[in-house]
Amino acid sequence: MDDIELNQDPVATAETDTGVPSRRRVLALGAMTAGMVVSIRPALAQTAGSVLNCEIPVPDPGRAGSYIDADGGVVPARTKGAFPPSTRAFKGEEVKRALASGSTLPGTDSDRSRAYVKYIRRLQRGQGGFTCFASLQMPRG
């Protein structure tokens, strides 16, 4: 006890002469980290759940009433060969399934679904549904 002051934290000062933390210090840090993991995991699970429940309107509200052509572009209403807007926004889970397996979006036939998926893939920052689509692209662990 000759080098340690009485007011010092023994865990904070428990390092060897080589600057390597002692076992006691490592255990203390491990205990703190475990507590953080326990509190972060539920938040990540909640985030993953909210991503699957987010919504993507087709087209976004700024272009409501416009049609979607076969290439996923937004065209004026009643354009020949284009599809009317969706009557409802698609849930993240529905879009993720269509992107992954090529299945159709609910309430659509295969051609219309393909056009909508192409539209969704072209979403950019600032458009309705972009954040949801971007979240679907992030890997989950």
Image: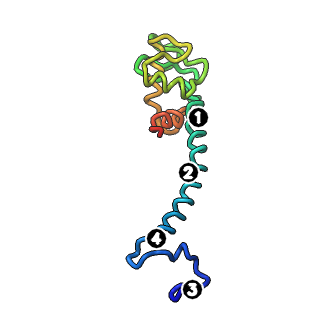
Quadrant, the N terminus:
bottom right
Q: Farthest residue in the bottom direction?
A: 2
Q: Which residue is mark 1?
A: 49
Q: Which residue is mark 2?
A: 37
Looking at the rendered structure, the secondary structure element under dot 1 is: helix
Label tally: 4
* Sequence-first disc among 1 and 2: 2
Name the spot of residue 136 as percent of width and height, x first.
Answer: 49, 33
For badge 2, the amino acid type reads Val
Looking at the rendered structure, the secondary structure element under dot 3 is: loop
User: In the rendered view, would you say 100 is above or below 112?
Assistant: below
Compute the Cα span from label 1 to label 2: 18 Å
What crowding class fits label 1: few (fewer than 14 Cα within 10 Å), some (14-19), or many (20 or more)? few
* Residue at x 44% of width, y 28% of height: 121
Compute the Cα span from label 2 to label 4: 23 Å
Compute the Cα span from label 3 to label 4: 18 Å
Q: Are marks 1 and 2 in contact (CB under 8 Å)?
A: no
Viewer-nearest residue: 36 or 75: 36
Res. 111 in view: yes
Residue 104 located left or right of residue 65: left
Q: Which residue is mark 4?
A: 22
Looking at the rendered structure, the secondary structure element under dot 2 is: helix
What crowding class fits label 3: few (fewer than 14 Cα within 10 Å), some (14-19), or many (20 or more)? few
Q: Are marks 3 and 1 in contact (CB under 8 Å)?
A: no
Compute the Cα span from label 3 to label 2: 33 Å
* Sequence-first disc among 3 and 4: 3
User: In the rendered view, would you say 106 is above or below 1?
Assistant: above
Viewer-nearest residue: 61 or 18: 18
Q: Which residue is mark 3?
A: 5
Q: Nearer the viewer, mark 3 or mark 1?
A: 3
What crowding class fits label 2: few (fewer than 14 Cα within 10 Å), some (14-19), or many (20 or more)? few
